[in-house]
Amino acid sequence: MKKASLAAVAALAFATGPALAQGSVKIGFVDTFSGPTAVIGNDMRNSFELALDHLGRKMGGLPVEVIYEDDQQKPEVGKQKTEKVIQSDHVNFITGYIWSNVLLASLKPAVDSQTFIISANAGPSRIAGELCSPFFFSTSWQNDQTPHAMGIYLEQKGVKTLYLLGPNYAAGKDMLAGVKATYRGQVIGEEYTKWPDQLDFSAELSKARAAKPEAIFVFYPGAAGVQFLSQYAQAGLRDQIPLYTAFTIDETTLPLQKDVALGVPGAQEWVNDLPNPANQKFVADFRAKYGHGPSFYGAQAYDAANLINSAVVAVKGDLTQKDAIRDEMRKANYASVRGPYKYGNNHFPIQNFYLQETVKNADGTFGLKTVATILKDSQDLFHATCPMKW
């Protein structure tokens, strides 16, 4: 009788397949949840949680368990937290990652363990190129792509001379290089400031004023962006030299930037008013749940959850099928809030980029609206140096 019971249990296990053996889908979410830039990490976490709500908090019939870890905006901490979710929590996927230097420090542990890592923001050029991996995907952009779009827009505006400002770390260097790759005018000044501690830009603004450019381009995400725009206006430059940007103005910074953000164009692959149904539901439900609109950071995290779900559903919850999971994610076969896109050979999106501007709403709040499409189906320039072919 005992032997028969054991046989029955074994037959049941065989019949129900891998989903029975896999108790849940475990996802590590490594991001910044403390300090001045915690507002970004919290927006990403809130968006990821909303995506899970929309999915019924299951993927491929399995419950989802998310382990949130704070990288404190430090590469060494981000690496430690990445190793922790791999080695101790045994996650199937890792996502999050605001900062390029944190992602670069965290990539190797994930790739070495063959754990899928999906960046929901950071997109350093090295990972798009020589460090590309079958276990890395992005639901955002390669760092240079957004400033590429702004460089093209500056060309369209007929700007002849340009001054560049950004923080001295991987993403800052990528951003300014991105503008220079497509802007054909003269760059008459280029300054890199300390990151993440410098919030006083008076010396740099004095240099920019003295150079007398036709325009200034800046990349300062988070709290630095709030301080920069405020000091730009206080220095009287707002009425003297037009300002252009990428990632300096978004829904996490606008409540503090307010009027000083008006008239400052930016480039982005997602804006809250994109008219596709997935985006309309995301924005409406986010507002209903959290009382304010989501940022592009959140939109990318929302997409990360849905990209993972598409792969888990395709393998019917059998998370041992890593080749099949990768093949499915390469299809980008889900309703992205940015609209349909494709993946390049380096697993970075080939996608549209839009011009966005700040508007003041009737209720006195501030928001962003789409003004124009700058680029369609844009691919990063580093995919050619990625050895991955598929």
Image (tube, helix red, strand yellow):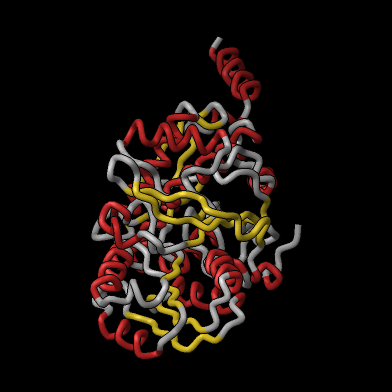
* Residue closer to the observer: 211 or 132: 211
Instruction: Note whether residue 52 is visible.
Output: yes
In terms of image quadrants, where is residue 218? Answer: bottom left
In terms of image quadrants, where is residue 12? Answer: top right
Q: Which residue is drawn at 67% across and 69% down?
A: 386
Relative to 48, residue 225 above or below: below
* Residue closer to the observer: 229 or 81: 229
Q: Residue 158 placed where, x, y %?
A: 58, 75
From the image, which quarter does the C terminus lie in? bottom right
Q: Residue 347 placed where, x, y %?
A: 63, 57
Q: Residue at x 31, y 68 (%)?
A: 229
Q: Residue 160 placed where, x, y %?
A: 55, 82
Q: Which residue is drawn at 33% across and 52% down?
A: 252
Instruction: Note whether residue 127 is visible.
Output: no
Q: Determine the residue located farthest toward the top in the rendered image.
A: 1
Q: Tell me: 310 left or right of 204.
A: right
Q: Determine the residue located farthest toward the right in the rendered image.
A: 390
Q: How many labels does the image show?
A: 0
Q: Tell me: 154 left or right of 27.
A: right
In terms of image quadrants, where is residue 79? Answer: bottom left
* Residue closer to the observer: 287 or 231: 231
Q: Which residue is drawn at 65% across and 70% down?
A: 381
Q: Tell me: 198 left or right of 85.
A: left
Q: Residue 89 placed where, x, y %?
A: 40, 46
* Residue closer to the observer: 160 or 324: 160
Relative to 11, residue 351 above or below: below
From the image, which quarter does the N terminus lie in? top right
